[in-house]
Image: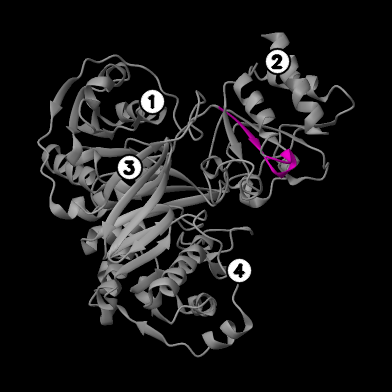
């Protein structure tokens, strides 16, 4: 099975994150940039399918030059190769344009199965799997907590608010996964060394047949007008329980009309 | 005034979800609200009274197996057709997994911009979004097409405005490419009568400090006394204390209730990302240095196994 995993480089969600003051895009320059956490589960799932059914795993990333670090990190977990879509004109692209670029790259890669994280920790928009599936005319099985592959039939279990659903589709398809699906492996030393030699092909917009005016700020379908930092919360009263902590807690809730 | 399409979210068990009422309230500021019901046979009939109560002037319904038996693709096709026909002033959907997914496909079908997790929307289409775990407030706008936005639950105070909507059944023509992801089973898991996590006005969450799955009864008891939902930190979920669908945080649900009660939760960034826009936060933790106290409007440093039962008893006394 030819599997492509979408990997996005994002600013570390464990540190302070900002938008740039000049163009309102994510400030990647001052951030510690890492693989989107959910994508590691996507990589793990792809590797498990390859181990069970054979095939090849390709990492696909759209991002600036520095995304190479995340691509090597992803490869160190075990995928065979990577494709990096990199082009200065992509800066400022909206989700709609991003899906156009990724779909164009995926068309060239002839994937049977595209796996991605259910959302990225920076935007948390969750739209990419369905946008790509819509463009490619393939099934999208989103939010999987379990994925079974039987020949060309895919079956996922997805959590819903009322329980869970079992959904099936045939390949080719896009599957997005939550962090409940598996436990991603740590790269081994051998894996890290091997990753340095794995092929990373770069695609420009011209390679994909996408015009620069369709992406970036020029092609954006939405715009950030302004952004402000929300003032940090300040802690209020803090008491130490000396036998009356529960009562005092309820007294506070009563003054706020919660009881 | 132009129509504003509100794509209805509802559950089999509880009917119209609160976020739908919020969207209808918001839609009234922008034009004339029309509700769009997408579901199984008879779905609109069951929901129409409630939708009318909150100002839906019209209800469009697309019902049946063709709609309900697959993941969102058929729903997006129906809404896209409706958008092209009625040329609404805006389309509002819930910022839930399904709402975002329908919106995603609409954006591609209509080559239209999309804004998710919107907490406010002005008449000129300027949306307010909360980004980076609630630390940044963003004003944004769709610049191509109509405002296509998903609204985050607990953003707007739902207010009734009676209307008596007529139901118009839409003719459903769904192509084969919309029927690729077939739902073969829906399994209801026991949930009880608690409100849905993202919509609840009170959320009581437990963390690693709760110690084990059995002790979560304490968290549930306090939640029930306060009429709230139960949440859990990632540490608690990873330790198997509570199911994943109740996880609050960066890799779980984002909640913004009137009251958030954190029990035995240290307040790591992972968790804060999902709850720090809550209106009032209270915390119980035995570690006086726990970062959760930096957010809490009221904090109790102490043993939750002593503090919580006492608090529960005190609430019962006052009832």
Q: Which residue is mark 2?
A: B315
Residue A47 horizontal/vertical position (percent): 46, 72
C-alpha gap between disc 2 and disc 3: 41 Å
Q: Residue at x 52, y 25 (%)?
A: B194
Q: Which residue is mark 4?
A: A32
Q: Chain of mark 4?
A: A
Sequence-wise, which precedes: disc 1 or disc 3? 1
Q: Determine the secondary structure under disc 4.
A: loop
Sequence-wise, which precedes: disc 1 or disc 2? 1
Residue most toward the bottom?
A: A197
Q: Which mark is residue B185?
A: 3
Magenta stretch, residue numbers? B202-212
**Magenta span includes B210:** yes
Observer-side mark, 1 or 2, equals 1
Q: Chain of mark 1?
A: B
Q: Which residue is mark 1?
A: B13
Quadrant location of the C terminus of chain A?
top right
Q: Chain of mark 3?
A: B
C-alpha gap between disc 1 and disc 3: 17 Å
Q: Quadrant of residue B111?
A: bottom left
Tell me the crowding category of disc 2: few under 14, some 14 to 19, or many 20 or more residues within 10 angstroms, Cα based: many
In the image, residue B156 sits, relative to residue B248, either above or below, namely above
Q: Residue at x 54, y 79 (%)?
A: A76
**Magenta span includes B187:** no
Marks 2 and 4 in Cβ contact (< 8 Å): no
Direction from residue B144 to residue A216 in the image, left or right: right
Nearer the observer, B52 or B182? B182
Marks 1 and 3 in Cβ contact (< 8 Å): no
Q: Which mark is residue A175?
A: none
C-alpha gap between disc 1 and disc 2: 28 Å
């Amino acid at each position: 099975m030819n599997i492509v995993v979408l990997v996005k480089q994002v600013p570390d969600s464990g540190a302070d994150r900002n938008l740039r003051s000049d163009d309102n895009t994510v400030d990647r320059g001052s951030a510690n940039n890492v693989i989107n956490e959910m994508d590691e589960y996507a990589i793990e799932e792809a590797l498990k399918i390859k181990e069970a059914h054979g095939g090849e795993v390709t990492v696909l990333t759209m991002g600036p030059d520095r995304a190479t670090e995340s691509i090597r990190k992803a490869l160190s977990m075990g995928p065979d190769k990577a494709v990096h879509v990199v082009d200065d004109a992509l800066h400022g692209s909206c989700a709609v344009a991003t899906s156009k670029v990724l779909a164009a790259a995926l068309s060239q890669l002839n994937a049977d199965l595209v796996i991605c994280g259910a959302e990225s920790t920076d935007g948390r928009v969750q739209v990419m799997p369905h946008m790509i599936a819509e463009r490619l005319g393939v099934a999208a099985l989103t939010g999987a907590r379990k994925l079974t592959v039987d020949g060309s039939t895919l079956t996922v279990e997805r959590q819903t608010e009322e329980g869970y659903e079992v959904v099936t589709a045939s390949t080719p398809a896009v599957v997005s996964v939550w962090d409940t699906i598996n436990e991603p492996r740590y790269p081994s030393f051998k894996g890290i060394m091997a990753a340095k030699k794995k092929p990373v092909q770069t695609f420009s917009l011209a390679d994909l047949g996408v015009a620069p005016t369709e992406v970036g700020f020029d092609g954006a379908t939405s715009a950030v007008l302004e952004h402000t930092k929300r003032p940090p919360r300040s802690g209020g009263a803090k008491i130490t329980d000396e036998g009356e902590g529960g009562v005092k807690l309820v007294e506070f809730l009563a003054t706020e009309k919660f009881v | 005034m132009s129509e504003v399409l509100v794509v209805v979210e509802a559950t089999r068990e509880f009917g119209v979800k609160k976020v739908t009422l919020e969207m209808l309230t918001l839609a009234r500021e922008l034009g004339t609200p029309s509700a769009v019901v997408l579901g199984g046979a008879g779905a609109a009939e069951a929901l129409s009274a409630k939708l009318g109560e909150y100002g839906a002037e019209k209800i469009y319904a697309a019902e049946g197996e063709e709609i309900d038996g697959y993941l969102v693709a058929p729903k997006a096709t129906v809404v896209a057709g409706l958008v092209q026909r009625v040329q609404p002033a805006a389309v509002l959907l819930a910022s839930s997994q399904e709402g975002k997914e329908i919106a995603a496909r609409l954006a591609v079908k209509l080559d239209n911009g999309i804004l998710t997790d919107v907490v406010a929307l002005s008449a000129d289409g300027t949306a307010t979004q909360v980004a980076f775990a609630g630390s940044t407030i963003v004003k944004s706008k769709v610049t191509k097409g109509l405002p296509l936005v998903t609204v985050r639950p607990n953003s707007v105070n739902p207010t009734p405005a009676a209307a008596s909507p007529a139901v118009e059944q839409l003719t459903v023509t769904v192509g084969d490419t919309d029927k690729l992801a077939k739902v073969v089973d829906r399994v209801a898991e026991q949930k009880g009568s608690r409100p849905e996590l993202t919509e609840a006005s009170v959320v009581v969450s437990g963390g690693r400090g709760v110690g084990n799955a059995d002790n979560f009864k304490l968290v549930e008891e306090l939640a029930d006394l306060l009429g709230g939902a139960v949440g859990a930190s990632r540490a608690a979920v990873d330790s198997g204390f509570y199911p994943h669908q109740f996880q609050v945080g960066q890799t779980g649900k984002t909640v913004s209730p009137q009251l958030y009660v954190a029990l035995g939760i240290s307040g790591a960034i992972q968790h804060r990302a999902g709850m720090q826009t809550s209106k009032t936060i209270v915390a119980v933790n035995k570690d006086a240095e726990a970062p959760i106290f930096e957010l809490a409007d009221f904090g109790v440093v102490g043993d939750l196994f002593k503090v919580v039962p006492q608090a529960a008893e005190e609430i019962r006394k006052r009832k």
